[in-house]
Amino acid sequence: MEGSLEKLYVDELKDLFSAEKQLTKALPKMAKAASSEDLKNGFEEHLEQTKGHVQRLEEIFTMLNEKAGGKKCVGMEGIIQEGAEVIAEAYEGDVMDAALISAAQRVEHYEIAAYGTVCAYAELLGESDHAALLRQTLDEEKETDEKLTELSKKINVAATLDASDDRPETKRRPGRAA
């Protein structure tokens, strides 16, 4: 198995498992930092969904007769660290929510890339049961990204009009992205 696609597949699954576990710790902090009820609820819903992603990965590891842990996803660690830095900034209200959406979409795009890859590996390796579980998670990650995009359309415009921003040029151009 060493040096094979099967080993790469298992390593990538372990990386994703670590990423999802890290995310279960980060999402409550993001929900707490959000001022928009829709965004806060979105983070809380995604936390529950993420717990399901962890369970699906555990199910795949059981099928593979492999241990789920043992690897740290440094990519997700970095993205989460950037999110923590956003939370530590002095942003408030809609501007903080716009920053949180940006951080959350980085997470989603990373996960979409990773799940797309392992799903392709599973299919190539003839692991159709795995592929079905991974595809379900991939679809949920894409759906979350779409929800964040929809929320950003409202929140980013509100952020440009935020009362705490006293720059007149910002107030004149409400269509500008945050």
Image: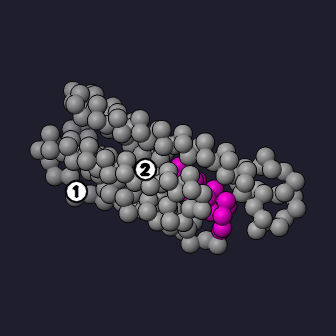
Residue 124 x, y percent position in the rendering: 27, 27
The crowding category of the residue bearing disc 1, from other C-alpha atoms within 10 Å (few below 14, some 14 to 19, many at least 20), is some
* Residue 56 location, quadrant: top left
Question: Range of the magenta residues?
Answer: 91-106
Residue 30 x, y percent position in the rendering: 50, 62
Q: Earlier in the sequence, mark 1 or mark 2?
A: 2
SS type, badge 2: helix
Tag 2 residue: 46
Tag 1 residue: 69
Q: Residue at x 24, y 34 (%)?
A: 130
| 9 vs 157, nearest the viewer | 157
Q: Residue at x 43, y 62 (%)?
A: 28
Q: Quadrant of the N terminus?
A: top left
Q: Residue at x 32, y 46 (%)?
A: 53
Residue 12 left/right relative to 161: left
Magenta segment includes 28? no
Above or below 33: residue 178: above
* Residue 9 location, quadrant: top left
SS type, badge 1: loop
The crowding category of the residue bearing disc 2, from other C-alpha atoms within 10 Å (few below 14, some 14 to 19, many at least 20), is some
Magenta part mainly helix, strand or loop? helix
Identify the residue at the far left of this view.
65
Magenta segment includes 105? yes
Q: Residue at x 73, y 50 (%)?
A: 157
Q: Are marks 1 and 2 in contact (CB under 8 Å)?
A: no
Residue 11 left/right relative to 170: left
| 172 vs 3, nearest the viewer | 172
